Image: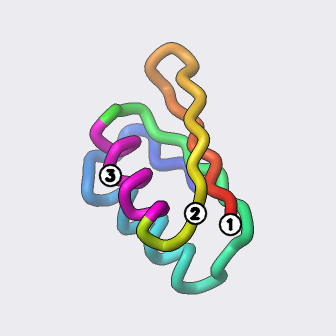
Amino acid sequence: MIDARGLSCPVPVVMVQQEVKKNAPAELTVMVDNRVAVENITRFARSQGYEVAVKDAGGEFELTLKK
């Protein structure tokens, strides 16, 4: 799980990129607290072949990336 709450883009995307490159997880959960990060992580994840599910918990977002 990556907790990128409180961080501005591109930091959350870079954290996800590093995890995908290092471990190629079949499933990854990412926590962020801004919509720009949601959009950018979703775009990157889809480009890497992941399906993305987003849960909005009152301004905090939980993204689940699955291969």
**Is 39 contained in the magenta span?**
yes
| Quadrant location, the C terminus | bottom right
For marks 1 and 3, give the CA distance: 18 Å
SS at circle 2: loop
Q: Nearer the viewer, mark 3 or mark 2?
A: 2
Residue carrying label 1? 67
Q: Residues within 10 Å of mark 1 (few under 14, many from 20)?
A: some
For marks 3 and 2, give the CA distance: 13 Å
Q: Give how far across and how far down residue 42 sits, in percent.
A: 43, 51
Which badge, 2 or 1, is on the more N-terminal residue? Answer: 2
For marks 2 and 1, give the CA distance: 5 Å
Residue sitting at x 52%, y 84%: 21
- What is the number of the mark on residue 5? none
Residue at the outermost right position: 26
Side of 67 where 57 appears, left or right = left
Side of 28 where 21 appears, left or right = left
Residue sitting at x 55%, y 42%: 31
Q: Amino acid at mark 3?
A: Asn
Q: Amino acid at mark 2?
A: Tyr
Quarter of the view holding residue 1? bottom right
- What is the number of the mark on residue 40? 3
Foreground residue, 19 or 5? 19
Image: magenta residue range: 36-46
- What is the number of the mark on residue 50? 2
Q: Residues within 10 Å of mark 2 (few under 14, many from 20)?
A: some
